[in-house]
Image: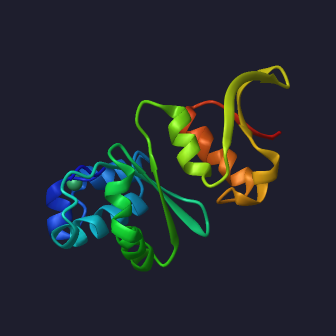
Amino acid sequence: MKTPVCDSDLKSGELCPSCEKKIAEGKITRLDFDVALILYKINDRYNISNASFYKAIDLGKVVLILTRGEVGLLIGKQGKIVSEISSSLGKKVRIAEASGDVKKTIADIISPARLLGINHAFHDGKEITKVRIAREDRADIPIGAEALEKVLHSLVEDEVKLSFE
Ligand SMILES: [Zn+2]
């Protein structure tokens, strides 16, 4: 299983000095470690050795887990794995894929709201990424618009504005 921390840390349940340093530098977070530990613990029951856990983002009520592998692998049959992670964290969990296709990642994150498209646009003289969502789906986005813009910003490394059309 790929996680942001090293395997020996998962076995011992303690962070090594090098991973501690990554946390201090903000490259990974304590939440990344917590989620990696949970996945490691449930691995023998669910056989998720092929999982590629990339990053966890705390969205308040929801924790977003980004994977560089199959989304389905971390969701599990009938959502069993998601519910395990969710009960361990005490928060709702969403899984989204963060590999090459940014559009697909964004579609996963905002689901069940539908993504109409992504455009580069100018806003206050700056180039931004405009994420277009169907107006009637506004209530279906998983988190508040502002929090969502922040998360998408960290993904696309560009300022993001949601546009409900
Ligand atoms: Zn380590």
Q: Position of residue 48 (x, y in %)?
A: 22, 59
Q: Is residue 81 above or below residue 151?
A: below
Q: Position of residue 153 (x, y in %)?
A: 62, 39
Q: Indicate left or right for 30 with 165 as reference.
A: left
Task: Report ligand 1 position as a quadrant.
Answer: bottom left
Residue with the most extreme right position:
124
Image quadrant where residue 106 sits? top right
Q: Depth check: 57 or 110 in front?
A: 110
Q: Indicate left or right for 22 with 42 as reference.
A: right
Give the residue at x 24% y 71%. 42
Q: How many marks?
A: 0
Give the residue at x 59% y 60%. 59
Q: Is residue 12 above or below residue 94?
A: below
Image quadrant where residue 27 sits? top left
Q: Depth check: 40 or 6 in front?
A: 40
Q: Depth check: 110 or 52 in front?
A: 110
Give the residue at x 53% y 71%. 92
Q: Is residue 106 above or below residue 89?
A: above
Q: Position of residue 122 (x, y in %)?
A: 79, 21
Q: Depth check: 105 or 1 in front?
A: 105
